[in-house]
Image (spheres, rainbow, N blue to C red):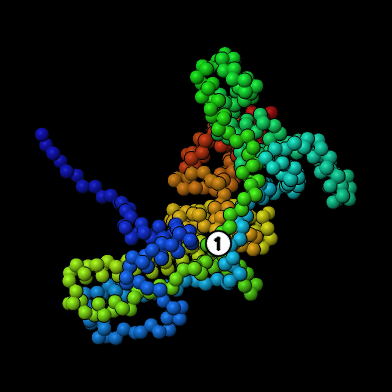
Amino acid sequence: MRFGFELKPELRHSLTPQMIQLLKLLQLPRLELEQMIRTELEANPLMEIAEPEYEEDQPEKSERDEEELNWEEYYFQDDVDSYYKPMRVDEEHLTPIPARPPSLRDTLLMQLRIHTNDPIVLKIGEYIIDSLDENGFLSTPLEQIIEKLEDDLKKEKGREFRVKPDTVKSTLELIQTFEPSGIGARDLRECLLLQIRDRFGEGSLEHKIVEKHLVDLEKMNYAQIARSLGVSEKQVIKAKELIGSLEPKPGRAYSSSDAGYITPDIIIDEKDGELVCMLNESDFPHLRIARAYKDILQNPGRFSKKERAFIRQKMNNAKFLISGLEKRRGTILRIANFVKDYQREFLEKGIEYLKPMNMRMIAQEVEVHEATVSRAVRGKYLRTPRGVFQFKYFFSRGVEHDGSDSCTTVIMQRIKELVEEEDRSKPLSDKELTALLQKEGYNVKRRTIAKYRTQLNILRARLRRAP
């Protein structure tokens, strides 16, 4: 028996313990980070809290000091500062305020303006959204909406204006594709069907049961349903469990009056006519490496090998925390400044100017990995001229593209382009559109394509076929 060995070049990316700790620092929200700093202060005798004015008193090291620090040359290596000065923000920003989550109306209007810029559709969509009840249902008949819209448009334009029923219907169908799933339904059956369409598809057993046998399902007539649909009772019961997991009131998640009080991590405020970003570190202590240990470092012979190892470890920990806090601050501020600049119109004018944005855009701009952006924004709040928002509020939902998130609007634009370029005698089906997009690296499913096509007001393939 012969054994052979083969050498293959291989690139591997591994995280060192220091990198893991840096990522942990980046991910921690303000309050948790403050607690971690104070815990480290208690555990590390080489760190101490300094008075805010201590920087002016920092002594310069002499050449003799440098020589005496022979075995501890790492003390100030790589130009790491021996102290950390937290950013301070104006006192007015420190009072905890209610964290106002985006309302159902705000959430739906943002999606509406992402998906269309047609002024009539926007007008109709806004009226439909304002007509939803707190549970997200539309109880106002479309005919009444049309009458009201025509009256409003007549007053606005000074002349008769007819609203096409098909336009109102298609606008409602567009809104019914928004998040939360099931929104804009006119009854419970339609609400469940909308959610099933998004989760399981229109041809699923769950869809058939709700569409044709909702009353039987409520009465638990599983045998009747099974016979009618040609499936087993076991399949019906399993489908019933999935249907039971749906949300019968999709708007109620936005109707809670319970508002938590928070102090934001990042503050975007106007100063001298310009928007500026600040990282809220007002409760963080000023840190520095304890001067009492300078004698220890200059007289290593007085200490045992074990004691020197202990001092070396604590010094490295102190240096790492100080440099890590600096890197954390720089990364978060670069990301916040990108959001500030990219969403300037939203910050200055309001929700209708919020633009779709994803983590890839930020990662490319600030030159970090998308995972770093994800960690930096996780669980953090921004205080802006428009209120307090979680960072994640500014990110559009996306689909996976070669392992990364791609903005939904990018996928929709690509669908629109493919349809515009298609052979009208042989229009592309949803299955063919899915295959083309998957070939381009987008990890999308057929029902997702059908959903986006509906949002773009693009007809099914058979209805697009030229005569």
Q: Is residue 418 visible?
A: yes
Residue 309: percent from left, percent from top:
22, 67
Q: How many marks?
A: 1
Secondary structure, mark 1, is: loop
Count residues near mark 1 (Cα–Cα under 10 Å), then give few for <14, some for 14-19, many for 20+. Answer: many
Residue occupying image coordinates x 31% and y 75%: 76
Q: Is residue 125 visible?
A: no
Give the labeled residue for mark 1.
Answer: 264
Instruction: Work out which quarter of the rendered image holds the C terminus and state it.
Output: top right
Residue 50 or 135: which is nearer the viewer? Answer: 50
As drawn, is 113 to the left or to the right of 238? right
Residue 435 or 317: which is nearer the viewer? Answer: 317
As drawn, is 72 to the left or to the right of 360? left
Residue occupying image coordinates x 21% and y 47%: 7
Residue occupying image coordinates x 65% and y 72%: 273
Residue 288: percent from left, percent from top:
38, 74
Q: Measured along the vertical axis of the image, is residue 383 above or below residue 153?
A: below
Q: Measured along the vertical axis of the image, is residue 425 above or below residue 147?
A: above
Residue 43 or 370: which is nearer the viewer? Answer: 43
